[in-house]
Image (cartoon, rainbow, N blue to C red):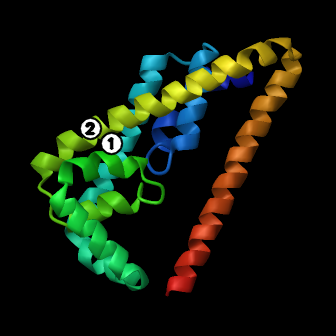
Amino acid sequence: MDINALIAQYGYAALLIGSLAEGETITLLGGVAAHQGLLRFPLAVLAVALGGMIGDQALYLFGRRFGNRALTRFSRHQKKIDRAQRLILRYPVWFVIGTRFMYGFRVIGPLLIGASRVPPKLFIPLNIAGALLWALIFTTLGYLGGEVIAPWLARVDQHLKHYIWVALAVAIVVLLRLFLKRRSRRRENQD
């Protein structure tokens, strides 16, 4: 099966799943695929936003239920956690929307927000707004990146184009594995 057909068929599902957690890379690639005409831009933005909303909502609920117990595992970072929780209480609107743009806070941010007892009636609409803004920005950046590489791709042999997409997919998988191994090592070192 042609790689472009696979992207067209499963691209939205891949965007949704890939954006459940740290999904900037997959989101950028979704923008590139939209530029290439393999995906529709508005649907790519919605898939990414939906994945981001679901992921952050799950982490928020986990934080509300188990947040304080879960945060004790990060006792080495207690000063940073306390500072973040003070910021959440002081600026909940900005923190909920901005947490997805803060490096290293994409996963822990919603957990901290939930543990800080930000009410769902405040979190849910801000989570939706933040996810839509984040999805629009990163998908657009990917789309613009597609604009930059499109002339180069037009000159590349059709078969070579497929190998580039496969190499890109393999690179993403390798980077994801490295990220997960690194995160696992960090957890082992913290325990």
Quadrant of the frame with the N terminus? top right
Q: Residues within 10 Å of mark 1 (few under 14, many from 20)?
A: many
> Is label 1 in contact with label 2 (beta carbons under 8 Å)?
yes
Q: Position of residue 2 (x, y in %)?
A: 74, 21
- Name the amino acid, label 2: Ile
Q: Position of residue 122 (x, y in %)?
A: 13, 47
Residue 27 in the image: above or below residue 109 = above
On the image, numbered disc 1 is attached to which residue? 53
Q: Position of residue 156 (x, y in %)?
A: 86, 17
Instruction: Please name the residue shown 54% across and 28% down the image.
Output: 141
On the image, numbered disc 2 is attached to which residue? 128
Gap between marks 1 and 2 measured at Cα: 6 Å
Q: Position of residue 93 (x, y in %)?
A: 20, 48
Q: Of helix, strand and loop, which one carries label 2?
A: helix
Question: Looking at the image, which is closer to me, 83 or 143?
Answer: 83
Q: Of helix, strand and loop, which one carries label 1?
A: helix
Task: Name which of mark 1 and mark 2 comes first in the sequence.
Answer: 1
Q: Residues within 10 Å of mark 2 (few under 14, many from 20)?
A: many
